Amino acid sequence: MDAKKYDLLLVDDEPDVLEFISYNLRKEGFKVHSATNGKDAIKIAQDVHPQLILLDVMMPEMDGIETCEEIRKIPALKNTLVAFLTARGEDYSQIAGFEAGGDDYVTKPIKPKVLVSRIKALLKRINTNEIEITPPIEGVKKSLVIDKDRFIIIQNGTEIVLPKKEFELLTLLHSRPQKVFTRDEIFSLIWGDDIIVGDRTIDVHIRKLREKIGEEHIVTIKGVGYKYIE
């Protein structure tokens, strides 16, 4: 991996943490930008379009969860990965982070080499986690259309904007209607084999999708996985 290709944005309200992590990432060749609060982070992200944001959860004024939610509303940052930085013993819910649109979480303190490995594993997904959409069958009118160029879905004429992971998950299921995707397939295709996520991660994303497009479109196959139906 050519680290020089990647812009990283590190957001933490502790200057010593910023300095330590920034130093180690720059030593690996990454271009590192930094911010000490969520509001500045959003401005910098809009200017530099980083491939990855490392985002501290506990910050004054605007915490990491709120910051991630705002970032996910910005179309230009739709492909930016967000990994939360969390302190050991911190009252932090992984589920809240994933619901906000986060892609992964990293627990502080973390050894520099381990952090670099986690970052490289995340960045691999930018190039390898593209999901092909099966063209619609000619003559069949679908109630839900996925517009990958604009990163939106259109349901019965209404445009719906989804967080990145929800969009990718729906794209996968929608690409093969009636096919049952196992949980292992979904984890591998959406989150990648190198990423550690909680057992409830898929369930949370499925629940959020059902709230937005309707319960009837995503069917649970107990003990196996999920499938999409029109």
Image: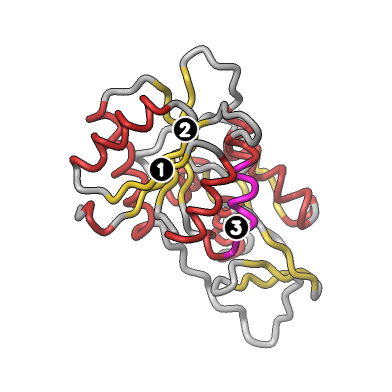
Give, as a three-letter code, the residue at label 3.
Phe
Marks 2,1: beta carbons within 8 A: yes
* Label 3 or label 1, whichever comes before in sequence order: 1
Residue 159 sits above or below residue 113 on the image: below
x and y, in percent, of residue 49 in the image: 44, 59
Residue 108 sits above or below residue 204 on the image: above
Residue at left 64%, top 36%?
A: 62
x and y, in percent, of residue 57 in the image: 55, 30
Q: Quadrant of residue 172?
A: bottom right
**What secondary structure is marked by label 3?**
helix
Front residue of 7/154: it is: 7
Residue annotated with mark 2: 12
* Label 2 or label 1, whichever comes before in sequence order: 2
Q: Quadrant of the C terminus?
A: bottom right
Residue annotated with mark 1: 34
**What secondary structure is marked by label 2?**
loop
Question: Separation of disc 3 and disc 1 at Cα?
Answer: 28 Å
Residue at left 64%, top 56%?
A: 73
Disc 3 versus disc 1: nearer the observer: 1
Q: Residues within 10 Å of mark 1 (few under 14, many from 20)?
A: many
Q: Which residues are magenta?
A: 67-75
> In the image, is 48 to the left or to the right of 202?
left
Q: Find the residue positioned furthest to the top.
A: 89
x and y, in percent, of residue 219 in the image: 70, 49
